[in-house]
Image (spheres, rainbow, N blue to C red):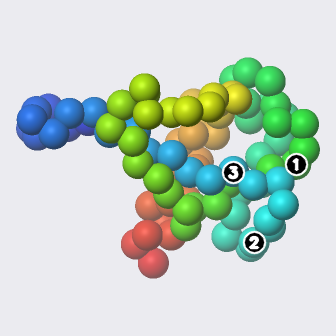
Amino acid sequence: MLEDPQLSTHGTQLITILLSSKTYHEDSLTLRDDDYEGEPLGERSHALPWSLGTRNSAADVEHYLTALVDDRTKDVAGQVTDYISS
C-alpha cells in the first residue's frame, strides 16, 4: 500500500504482484511456506516482478487468500524496483 502526504488528493494506492505456482523465471522470487502471514498457498510459488497491478481501494480486491510477511514484502518490493530500473 502506498500513499504520499505531499500528494494528498491522490489517495491510497494498492500495488499487487502476480504470484504463480506454474511459472519459474530466473528473475522471479521463490516463496516458501514461512513467507506467508496466513496459510501458505500449498505449492511452491514465485513472485513475478514484471507483473504488477494497481487498485485504488481494498474494496477492489475480489478474492483474498493470504499475505506475505513484512520482510518478504520488502524483498519483493526491492526486486520490483530493481526490475523496473534496469
Vertical arrangement, residue 81 with respect to residue 69, above or below:
below
Helix, strand or loop at disc 1? Answer: loop
47 lies left or right of 82: right
Mark 2 / mark 1, whichever is N-terminal? 2
Q: Nearer the viewer, residue 75 or 44?
A: 44
Seen at 40% across and 72% down, the residue is: 85
Separation of residues labelled 2 and 3 (CA atoms): 12 Å
To which residue does mark 3 refer?
Answer: 19
Q: Amino acid at mark 2?
A: His
Could you tell whether 8 is left or right of 22 in the image? left
Mark 2 surroundings: few (<14), some (14-19) or many (≥20) residues within 10 A: few
For the C terminus, the image quarter is bottom left
Q: CA distance from mark 1 to mark 3?
A: 10 Å
Q: Is residue 4 above or below residue 75?
A: above
User: Furthest residue to the top?
Assistant: 38
Percent coordinates x, y for residue 39 in the rendering: 80, 24
Position of the N terminus by quadrant: top left
Label at residue 44: 1
Which numbered mark, 2 or 3, is in the foreground of this view? 3
Q: Amino acid at mark 1?
A: Arg
Horizontal and vertical percent for residue 56? 33, 38
Estimate the spatial distance between the alpha carbons at disc 2 and disc 1, rounded to whole Å: 13 Å
- Residue at label 2? 25
Above or below residue 16? Residue 11 is above
Q: Is residue 65 visible?
A: yes
